[in-house]
Amino acid sequence: MLTPAPSTSDRAPQRVKHPRVLSIAGSDPSGGAGIQADIKSISAHGGYAMAVLTALTAQNTQGVQGVHIPPVAFLSSQLDAVAADISLDAVKIGMLADAQVMRAVGDWLAVTRPAVVVLDPVMVATSGDLLVAEGAHEALLELLKFTHLVTPNLPELAVLLNQAEAGSWAEALEQGQQLAAAHEVLVLVKGGHLPGEECPDALVWPDGTHQEFRAPRIATKNTHGTGCSLSSAVATLRAQTGDWVESVRLAKEWLSGALVTADDLGVGSGAGPINHLHALWANAPAAAGTFSDELWADCAPQRQAIFELDFIKELAAGTLESKHFAYYLAQDALYLGTYSRVLARASSLAPTEEEQKFWAQGAQNCIEVEMSLHRDWLSQFPLESPMGPVTKHYLDHLQAVACSGSYGEVVAAVLPCYWLYAEVGRVLHSDYLSYSGKHPYGAWLESYADEDFSRATERAVAIADTAARHGSAPERERMRAAFAHSAQYEVDFFAAPHRRVDADLGARRD
Ligand SMILES: Nc1ncnc2c1ncn2[C@@H]1O[C@H](COP(=O)(O)OP(=O)(O)OP(=O)(O)O)[C@@H](O)[C@H]1O
Ligand SMILES: Cc1ncc(COP(=O)(O)O)c(N)n1
């Protein structure tokens, strides 16, 4: 005998970092839709995913070959087993197969009353195959009284209202308003089935108000499971944020990333799956054989050259003359002012909001570092230093790429400044830790151990890998060239203080 389900008062609080999210749905063995998509989507959003199976399908990216519905009593046993032991922060409901299954889920919802219930009224697969018994939609409507958000696509919205399918976004919104008002439920109207360059969605409240979410339509045939994945994402995010609008906004942004990178997966020959884990994989440390591995290997001569420079050796040993250090700092400050603008250009070209924010943050950091160079360091050296030739050539190169290059090329061009600087910092900082006595450049070398900067470097490398994956072969070659030029300028930049100052060019140093 199972213990009774937790009562409503036993429910977890509204905002949960790792919500326990149960998907009640059908299985898609090809992994793109149903339970399998739900688990990936919930996990991608930081939720703990659980799954109760309503039906098994024999299905792949080309279509559904069969549906098996296990005994409904066993479905109820699964539901009771989970709810008896685990507090549920959110429930997502997908394929329910027939009216009997719907009634069993309804009975369970009536007792369990989860804090968040998102119902995706799955009826037809992307392939056109039927996933619900004819006429079962009456029983589906019964479930709306336990539902907080229902997420129909346009054909499903029409069936639920017993009307013809909306032919325009305005008609779709009108139907969403009817459904929301008739059942006192929040409706997410999805415009994926409409033609056009955009895929609009809208949250519609029972009082007729609505909030639209717009996103460009992504050109891919790999859209299998978008509805399942979106509804699971929204359920998870709602438990985390406590806010429907924010949840849909975030879920849609994530979905765009999953669609943009869907073609990378190469799964099946029909409508393939979306890339649920795109953000995780973009952040994963570069695996062997990635584009960034190749870039790193390609710049081995430059890395070696940097550590053989007098500037670096003397900086490490504490014997660097202050005139060389002052020249370097002055050029660095001049460099950062323009480098910041190039990072802002990367931000303006970025394909996702996360990358846009990342580069904008980098641009802001550069200005702050430039200001602190003037305030904390250059004020100690009363020497005026105009822009040197290396600084100028390096910036000319970066600006040329920023003007006419693709996003990937701009990312590749700015990468050596992150990556080689981080590498120099790593080595000099560990040398400094074993230095005995007071190091004249101690405060400077200590700043090299900045964890935020090394995290930013890892992210910049991951972004370059993603951009390379999405780019064509000629674009990857241009990325490689942009990176190589910048890497060489990094060497020249560290070499410049000795070359320019020791050339004794007096006030006309450039
Ligand atoms: N090509 C696309 N580009 C961008 N967003 C899309 C695209 N296709 C669908 N979407 C989005 O995917 C989500 C699901 O939309 P859709 O209207 O296709 O629902 P669905 O039919 O239930 O999904 P499914 O394809 O899983 O059956 C919506 O947010 C929609 O805007
Ligand atoms: C088990 C299951 N659940 C849901 C869908 C709908 O997803 P899509 O419309 O993308 O095929 C599906 N194909 N299979």
Image (spheres, rainbow, N blue to C red):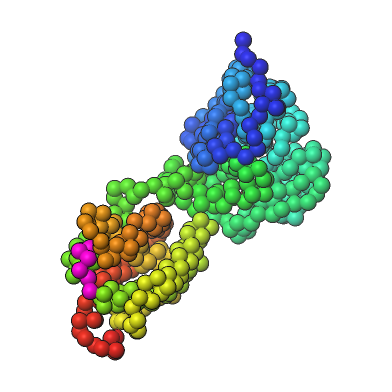
| In-front residue for pair 505/305 | 505
Residue at coordinates 20% horizontally, 81% vertically from top-left? 502
Q: Where is residue 494? Give x, y as percent.
A: 26, 71
Q: Which residue appears farthest toward the front when viewing the image?
A: 437
Looking at the figure, which quarter contains the N terminus?
A: top right
Q: Secondary structure of the magenta portion, mostly?
A: loop
Is 508 positioned to the left or the right of 334 in the image?
Answer: left
Residue 163 vertical placement versus 117 (above, below): below
Q: Where is residue 507? Give x, y as percent.
A: 29, 89
Residue at coordinates 41% horizontally, 55% vertically from top-left? 452
| In-front residue for pair 494/208 | 494
Q: Which residues are magenta?
A: 316-321
Choose top left, top right, bottom left or bottom right for residue 484. Answer: bottom left
Q: Where is residue 401? Give x, y as percent.
A: 39, 72
Q: Where is residue 383? Give x, y as percent.
A: 33, 82
| In-front residue for pair 367/228 | 367
Q: Would residue 27 be seen by someone viewing this image from the given angle?
A: yes
Please say whether residue 320 is one of the residues in the magenta stretch: yes
